[in-house]
Image: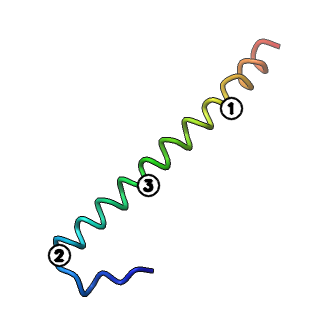
Amino acid sequence: MIDLAAYSSAVQAAALVGAVLLEAIVLHVGYGALERVATPLVDRITHA
């Protein structure tokens, strides 16, 4: 784990915002991929 205690509060805040933004991007891409895979599968099941 990265120790940011030695840095100023502005750097700590920027690192936290960056981490949250990165997590949001990863989740957005992941759920988009899941939706692409799951939508045809659900359609195939419901229209069978």
Give the mark nearest the N terminus, 2 or 1: 2
Give the mark nearest the N terminus, 3 or 1: 3
Q: Which mark is residue 9?
A: 2
Q: Quadrant of residue 33?
A: top right
- In the rendered image, residue 29, in percent from the top left (x then y), is placed at 52, 41
Type of amino acid at the residue the image marks with label 1? Val
Q: Quadrant of residue 31?
A: top right
Label 2 near label 3: C-beta < 8 Å?
no
Q: Quadrant of the N terminus?
A: bottom left
Where does label 3 land, which residue? Answer: 23
In the depicted structure, whether residue 14 falls above or below residue 23: below
- In the rendered image, residue 40, in percent from the top left (x then y), is placed at 71, 22
Q: Identify the colour scheme used.
A: rainbow
In the depicted structure, whether residue 24 falls above or below residue 39: below
Where does label 1 land, which residue? Answer: 37
Answer few, some or many: residues within 10 Å of disc 1's Cα (few below 14, many 20 plus, some between 14 and 19): few
Type of amino acid at the residue the image marks with label 2? Ser
